[in-house]
Amino acid sequence: MKARKFAGGKRITGLKTSFSELFGKEQELSQNRRNILISNYSSAVSNNLFGGNFFTGFLLLMNINDSNIGLITMISMFGNMLQVFSPLLLERFAERKKILIIGRIIVHFINLVIISIIPLLVPNDSLKLSFILVATLLVNVLNAMIAPGYSVWHIKSVPNDMRSRYFSFVHLTNNILVYSVILIASRMVDTFKHNGNELTGLLILRAIALVLAVFDIIYMLKIREYPVPKRNIRVRDVLLSPLKEKKFLVTVAMACMWSFTANIPGSYYTVYLLRELNISYSFLNTVNMLSIPVMILVMPIWRRRVDTTSWFRTLYLCISLYIVHYLGLAFVTEKNILLYPVFMIYAFAISPGINLVFSNLPYVNMPEDNQTNLLGFYSTMNSFAGFLGASLGRQFITISDGVQVKLGETIIGNKQLILIIAAVFMLISALVIFNLTRKSEKAEAS
């Protein structure tokens, strides 16, 4: 599919939309979307410079073991579960912009300043782990209290009839930018690692991420807020009112199935690649860079799938196809390392569909009223499901330390076996979502 000029009203990357329609200057909502886009770009690049593979490497340099890396993931999930209580704070205000931006600044500060200085100032490994756990919990608790507010604030600038086009564009361009920057960053860190200064390289990335975080805040300040009615909400309302929205609960159940399964593998496979196979950051992120041309080709296909079927049907199809990715990666060893890019490229063809669906999934069956509460409930249930998945994964890694299984000619360790376990649960998830979709469609038809 041929990409056309990126200007005026011309079509881009086969997405059947125009840049001016989504982000032109003639309308206030378009200006908002443009500022949201730049804020998202800054935040996404920043998060990837201190997170992902780089954060796993950062933890390994502090001699944090597999089990405790899993514990850090679980702490993150636990903190995010508190999103259900976000309305108790946010619903008191008709205008929340100041609170949300102050919260964002604090989150950036803990992530990019406090956590960065821990390996420099804390003397021993056990204390480093303790400080990392506390900082991770603080970040995620604070983020949980404000995160639904961002979604409610920003989605008002994206009309329903353009959401599939908007989210397609955002995911495509965001990934091009993120992977381009990460590839350059990986080569830089590998150079420092080769010279015995890996920590220095990772801290430089965190400094760059801090600068990008400032841009994130600057452009968030430019996004207009549309006030919402203040409400006096009680803990009982927060916990029970979402249970009255039956259609919305179907959406929550589907999202939880994916969240549980996707969090089983945790970061253990990245540890396997970095530590046991000694793969470089550059190799990993060069492979990730291949997602860009693949995404350009497949994003229009997934958008068309959503438009011609439904968000739910696209979700269970994507999850069903994604199983092959996990099974393939489980058989990657030092002798057949080329299997890694093969099955990653396969995943790159499927993941745009999953990301596109989840961009709009919480809003599919969401009523106009009480959105902050419903988004908090949605995120909390997702985090709880992810917490259970991460707990299962950590428990498996802990009890199977040193276990090896021979499948054909390949010897598989516990960090590969966990992918097979995740694939089994993914199959169950796809079947459950398929069932829920059929029931939902029958109910609407009747």
Image (cartoon, grey):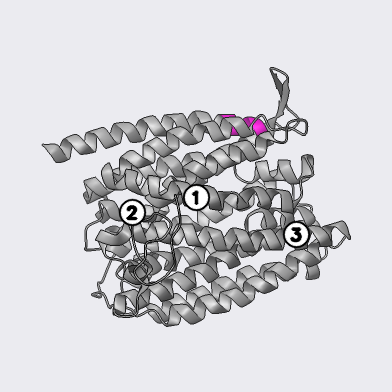
Give the percent coordinates (x, y) of residue 64. Answer: 75, 51
Q: Which residues are magenta?
A: 416-420
Q: Nearer the viewer, mark 3 or mark 2?
A: 3
For residue 260, side relative to residue 64 (left or right): left
Query: Does the image show residue 235?
Result: no
> Dot 1, crowdedness within 10 Å: few (<14), some or many (≥20)?
many
Q: Does the segment drawn in magenta span residue 419?
A: yes
Please name the amino acid that badge 1 sits on: Met
Query: Tag 3's secondary structure?
Result: helix
Question: Could you tell me the amino acid type at mark 2?
Answer: Pro
Three-letter code, disc 3: Arg
Secondary structure mostly seen in magenta is helix
Element under disc 1: helix
Residue 229 in sight? yes
Which residue shows up at 34% across the image and 61% down it? 17
User: Are the residues tagged 1 and 3 within 8 Å (C-beta)?
Assistant: no
Mark found first going from the N terminus, 1 or 3 = 3
- The residues tagged by marks 1 and 3 sit, at their Cα atoms, a distance apart of 23 Å
- Which residue, given by chain and number where applicable, does mark 2 sit on? 362
